Image: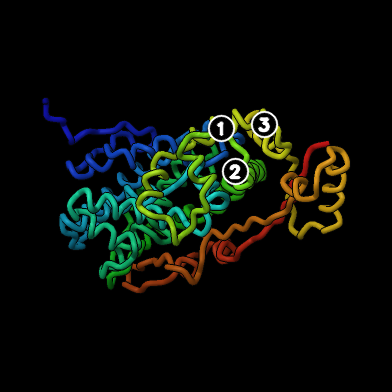
Amino acid sequence: MNKVNKLKIFNDPIYGFITIPNSLIFDLIAHKYFQRLRRISQMGMTYLVYPGAHHTRFHHAMGSMHLMQKAVNVLRFKGVDISQEEEDALLIAILLHDIGHGPFSHAMEHSIVTGVSHEAISLLFMERLNQEFNGSLTLAIQVFKGEYHRNFMCQLISSQLDMDRADYLKRDSFYTGVAEGNINAERLITMLNVVDDELVVEEKGIYSVEKFLVARRLMYWQVYLHKTSVVAEQLLMRVLKRAKELSNKGVDLKASSALTYFLKNDINKSNFTIDTLDVFAHLDDYDIVSAMKEWQYHDDFVLKNICSMIINRDLLKVKLKDKKHKIEDVQAHKERLMKQHHISAEEAGYFVFTGEVSNQAYELKSQNINILSKSGKIKDIVKASDQLNLKALSKPVTKYYICYPKE
């Protein structure tokens, strides 16, 4: 057999060429667990609002790894000692940080699996891969869990200015066409430094950080929490919830074997075993879409109508406002629906519901973004900035929505 060249390059629309640095990372990318990310959309149902948003978790993981390579090079240039083993650990941890995402990224966590986050599943995948790759992911797992003694490395993976956020803001902005999210990731990384084992941004980069935080706020309101995206994701969760209810009652639903397993079994944190992980590894967006295409013709009123809404993009009406919606308004919509279609209050609850969305661009008490001044002083970005809006960005803003069928 011919030897495979493992030092490949990818052509990425955001950064240009992305290089795979070594054969271990090549083998991880080539692994079926990672290749599955090609079939998991990065932004769930957002393509129903922004037609270009069809990029995947695979794109994002590769981009995050590329930015981590740049960050390591910048920090080394500034005299920060990072060994080859530590670099590999950083690249592996960021590459695999989202490997545990289920179909459409978040819908499954809130419907057919109980109390198991995608982070927990990512960790299970990494531990499984560590066995397969003879312990070569041990350090990466430590960094991913935030347990490594060099704190700045953990911050590069997960903090308020990590390589994950740096990639997804720029990438999601590009694929949605929402220019407000287009941050200068390269400049942000170039301004990084380490002081007393903490990640800091040099004073010259303060405006790039300000732009980053404003972009994050705008992307949340304009894209991630767009009311149509919210209602589409809520409907998707309700499809899976209803399918699970029907399966528990013995109703036979056409679905892939992987999806059927999760519909027929109550999976939670305590029984998410290695066998469950193997089944989960076969589950992706395609299972859900093909199931909905079948279920839109099912006898069950709730299941068929919600599936039809998503497939044909004929969604519920959604209203967003600053105050909670009145209970009597919700009840009126429910009663109208019950009377019109002769359905129960429980069934009407699938089509009429309320909820809330919250946006906080910066958390003052959580892994602060610190600015390093020329004098050597370190200040939180809110105190260092002359941009008055930044303090406002650190306060959560909550809006309330109501969803109900169109007249």
User: How far is disc 1 from disc 2 in space, using C-alphas?
Assistant: 10 Å
Label 3's element? Answer: loop
Residue sitting farthest toward the front? 250
Residue occupying the point 38% across, 38% down: 36
Residue 82 image offset from top left, x and y in percent: 19, 60
Q: Is residue 132 left or right of residue 238?
A: left
Q: Which residue is mark 1?
A: 254
Q: Quadrant of the N terminus?
A: top left
What number is the disc on residue 247?
A: 2
Q: Quadrant of the C terminus?
A: top right
Q: Determine if residue 334 is in view.
A: yes
Q: Are marks 1 and 3 in contact (CB under 8 Å)?
A: no
Residue 309 image offset from top left, x and y in percent: 68, 33
Q: Earlier in the sequence, mark 2 or mark 3?
A: 2
Q: Determine if residue 53 is in view.
A: no
Judge whether 325 appears above or below 263 on screen: below
Q: Amino acid at mark 3?
A: His
Q: Earlier in the sequence, mark 1 or mark 3?
A: 1
